[in-house]
Image: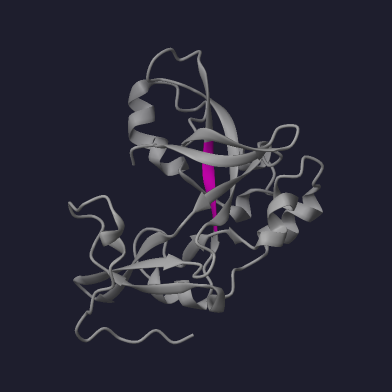
Amino acid sequence: MSYPAWPVVVDHNGARLEEFTWGPIPAMLNSPEKVKKQRQYYLNARSEKVLEKNTMWSKIRHQRCLIPSTGFFEYREVGLKSKVCYTINQGANKVFFIAGLWALSNSWDTDKSEKIPTFTLLTREANPLLKQIHNAGENPGRMPLMLTEDMLATWIRPDLDDAGIKEILDFSMPPDNLEYWPVNSVRKRHEDDESVLQRVEVEGLPPIEV
């Protein structure tokens, strides 16, 4: 929840890699107090809302971006008081891309009139693999809207119409394209290096069936 700066790909007279801040600040968050309490709810956006009329995501549906990633973490509930952290990636694709939307947001950190480039990450209903891993919490059964290589240029194309947007929003990354394994919890203090990806053995961990 630190709202980091992150490289994203946008089409500004051609595809360009730029640095945006993760987490839009919608107009309704019109005070530093509201930003502090509620900005976290805009880090991710449900893909189902992008083409739904009168939503903030529909208003910026033509401001699309690609978010590069090497992987992400999700927690699997395996007992009433037991959760196991997993890392998920695309195996051979060391860097893959997640669909996103961007917006110029008011900055309440300094001058509220300053516009800063921000982005949100799109999520969708999870595939059969991620449904078993991301099976608890406030929004279970969700996963990032990961794209295939042949979708990347299309997603950020300025003239993409709503039918084309919907076609991509309806895409679900097949489980066979993903690799996953249990790791130590990333919610605890740890070194910020590749050791967080080290596979761990969890005694009695039920298998995942896909």
- The residue closer to the viewer here, 162 or 192, is 192
Quarter of the image where the N terminus is located: top left
Q: Is residue 28 left or right of residue 188?
A: right
Q: Where is residue 138, by image quadrant?
A: bottom left
Q: Is residue 185 left or right of residue 72?
A: left
- The residue closer to the viewer here, 22 or 38, is 22
Give x and y (percent) for residue 110. 39, 15
Q: Where is residue 10, by image quadrant?
A: top right
- The residue closer to the viewer here, 171 or 39, is 171
- Is residue 178 inside the magenta stretch? no
Give x and y (percent) for residue 109. 37, 20
User: Which residue is depicted at the point 33% across and 30% down?
Assistant: 36
Q: Is residue 20 above or below residue 70?
A: above
What colouring style does the render use? one colour
Callout count: 0
User: Which residue is depicted at the point 45% across and 43% down?
Assistant: 43
User: Which residue is depicted at the point 66% across and 65% down?
Assistant: 171
Give x and y (percent) for residue 22. 46, 38
Report the predominant secondary structure element of the magenta stretch. Answer: strand
Q: Which residues are magenta?
A: 119-123
Q: Is residue 206 above or below residue 173?
A: below
Give x and y (percent) for residue 119. 53, 38
